[in-house]
Structures are given as structure tokens and as C-alpha cells.
Image (tube, rainbow, N blue to C red):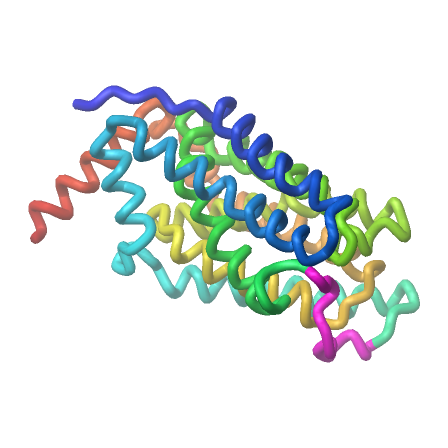
């Protein structure tokens, strides 16, 4: 039996450090150079995550990363579809509720352009695609397991959602980003960072019900990014949306209490991975 001790604090320190060391200079750099720094910062957590796994000297951890990335058999597509439908309902409900606050039904339409410009590698569409893929490699490749190994998945989701949300902080000051556009109203900024916490619960749920598949999380993350960018919701409606997401996350937690509150896995994630890998070899 291999022994390895997860290092979540060290991971987050390095993930933040190597992201922000690129994003902070991008605040003052010319747009063309700044876009390169933006992409470098976006990739940083995935690089840190992969290095943590590869330098762990744990063959179980290395095989687990491989399985999570290319193990298509792990994905429970019905659960991914359910998560996509849940988020679609969240968007629809948010727009309908926003009508009570004077917002328009015209929000049920697609925007002509993305809310951010001048960043990424060629186009905003490529940027959100890259973000969906690269971010999940970083957060699911090592991060979530490193926290979950020490506590139940409820508290893991809470901590991860908060840290993941705050990771975006420098983007507030980089011209052309979605986050920079929120500075017109402090309420929009606060809402952005708070909304990451309930969304973290939903993404953790997608991750766990698909047997810890990174691919499943990529698909869901891409859908969320696309809906947030292309559906013509106003900033006010996105504040309403945060309340609806919180309600949806609460329902998911209550309907999956065993999943979120069990502690059998605490301190034993690596053992569970090894047992799962042995089962796969036996079946083959």
C-alpha cells in the first residue's frame, strides 16, 4: 500500500502565486502582450496540479490522473445531462424572477458579442473553451481531492468554491475581462465572488457522480461559461441568479446527503483509488 500525503495548502499557494504573477503584470501591459500573460496565468493551476501528481512518486496517483482525463467509461452522461438541465433551469428561473425587478423578457436571447474582449488566444469563444478545459485539469487533477482527503465533500465544496472564486481577483483590474466590467457597481463584484461558492457545490457533485471524471466537469464548465456569456442576462439578473443557484445547490446537497456528508473516504482516497484501479485490471 502506497503512502502519500496530500498538500492542499501548498497547492493553493503555488496555484495562486503562478497565476497572479502573470495576471498582475497583465493589468499594466499592452493588450497584445497582456493576452499572452492572461493565458499563462490561466494554465498555471493545471501545470501545478500535474507537477504535484508527477512528482508525488505515487503510481496510484499518476494512474488516477490518467483515468480521470481519458477514462471515458467513467463519465455518467445522464448525470452530466442532468447537471446541464439544472443550470439551464437556473438561468430560465432567474430571468423570470428578474421581471419582478423591472428586467426585460428580451434576456431570453443570445448576445451578439462576448462580454470580454482583447484576451485569450484568437477569440472569446476559444478563450472560454480553453478555460473550461484547462481550469478543470487544475482543479480536479489534484486540488479537490487534496482537500476532500481531509474532510467531507460538503466542507470541501465550500472551501473549494471560495478559493476558486477568489482566484479570479486580479481579473477585476485587467481591461477587457468580464470581471473588469463588473466594477461599475460593487454589488456586481460581490455577487461574482459569492456565486462561485454554490456553483462549487454543483461542480463537485458533477465530479463525484461521474466517478471523479475531469471530462464530465469540462463539459459542464463549458456549458456554464457559454450560458453566462451568450444569454443576454443583465448584471441585475445575475444577482438573482446567484440566489437561484444557491437554492439549486441546496436541493442537490439535500438529495445527496450521503454523498456530501459521508466521511468513509477521509484519509483513504488513495486507498480507494488503488482498489478501483485493481478492479479495472481484474475486469480486463
Can you give x and y, in whole percent of width and height, for residue 93 in the image? 71, 66
Give left or right: position of 13 versus 173.
left
Q: Nearer the viewer, residue 244 or 228?
A: 228
Residue lying at the far right of the rendered structure: 102
What residue do we see at 48% from left, 28% from top?
11
Q: Is residue 263 above or below residue 188?
A: above
Q: Which picture quadrant has residue 65?
A: top left
Instruction: Report whether residue 249 is seen.
Output: yes
What residue do we see at 67% from left, 48% from top?
246
Q: Nearer the viewer, residue 204 or 253?
A: 204
Give left or right: position of 150 versus 228.
left
Instruction: Report whether residue 172 is seen.
Output: no
What residue do we see at 70% from left, 40% from top?
25
Can you give x and y, in whole percent of width and height, for residue 179 in the image? 75, 51
Magenta stretch, main secondary structure, is loop
Instruction: Give the total of numbered labels.
Output: 0
Q: Nearer the viewer, residue 240 or 143?
A: 143
What residue do we see at 72% from left, 41% from top?
170
Residue 25 part of the magenta segment: no
Can you give x and y, in whole percent of width and height, for residue 41 in the image? 58, 44
Q: Is residue 196 above or below residue 231?
A: above
Can you give x and y, in whole percent of width and height, for residue 268 in the image? 30, 26
Give left or right: position of 83 versus 145.
right
On the rendered image, what quadrant is the N terminus found in?
Answer: top left
Magenta-drawn segment: 105-118
Amino acid at each position: 500500500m502506497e503512502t502519500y500525503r496530500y498538500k492542499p495548502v501548498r497547492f493553493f499557494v503555488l496555484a495562486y502565486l503562478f497565476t497572479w504573477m502573470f495576471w498582475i503584470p497583465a493589468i499594466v501591459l499592452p493588450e497584445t502582450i497582456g493576452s499572452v500573460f492572461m493565458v499563462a496565468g490561466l494554465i498555471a493551476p493545471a501545470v501545478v496540479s500535474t507537477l504535484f501528481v508527477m512528482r508525488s512518486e505515487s503510481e496510484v496517483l499518476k494512474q488516477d490522473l490518467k483515468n480521470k482525463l481519458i477514462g471515458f467509461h467513467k463519465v455518467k452522461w445522464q448525470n452530466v445531462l442532468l447537471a446541464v438541465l439544472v443550470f439551464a433551469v437556473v438561468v430560465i428561473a432567474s430571468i423570470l424572477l428578474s421581471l419582478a425587478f423591472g428586467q426585460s423578457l428580451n434576456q431570453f436571447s443570445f448576445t451578439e458579442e462576448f462580454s470580454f474582449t482583447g484576451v485569450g488566444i484568437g477569440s472569446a469563444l476559444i478563450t472560454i473553451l480553453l478555460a473550461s478545459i484547462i481550469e478543470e485539469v487544475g482543479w480536479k487533477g489534484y486540488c479537490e481531492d487534496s482537500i476532500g482527503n481531509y474532510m467531507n465533500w460538503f466542507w470541501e465544496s465550500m472551501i473549494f468554491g471560495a478559493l476558486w472564486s477568489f482566484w479570479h481577483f486580479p481579473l477585476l483590474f485587467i481591461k477587457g475581462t468580464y470581471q473588469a466590467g463588473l466594477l461599475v457597481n460593487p454589488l456586481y463584484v460581490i455577487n461574482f465572488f459569492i456565486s462561485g461558492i454554490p456553483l462549487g457545490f454543483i461542480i463537485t457533485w458533477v465530479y463525484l457522480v461521474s466517478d471523479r471524471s475531469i471530462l464530465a466537469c469540462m463539459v459542464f464548465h463549458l456549458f456554464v461559461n457559454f450560458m453566462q456569456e451568450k444569454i443576454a442576462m443583465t448584471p441585475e439578473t445575475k444577482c438573482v441568479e446567484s440566489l437561484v443557484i444557491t437554492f439549486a445547490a441546496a436541493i442537490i446537497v439535500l438529495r445527496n446527503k450521503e454523498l456530501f456528508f459521508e466521511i468513509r473516504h477521509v484519509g483513504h482516497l488513495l486507498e480507494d483509488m488503488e482498489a478501483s484501479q485493481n478492479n479495472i485490471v481484474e475486469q480486463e
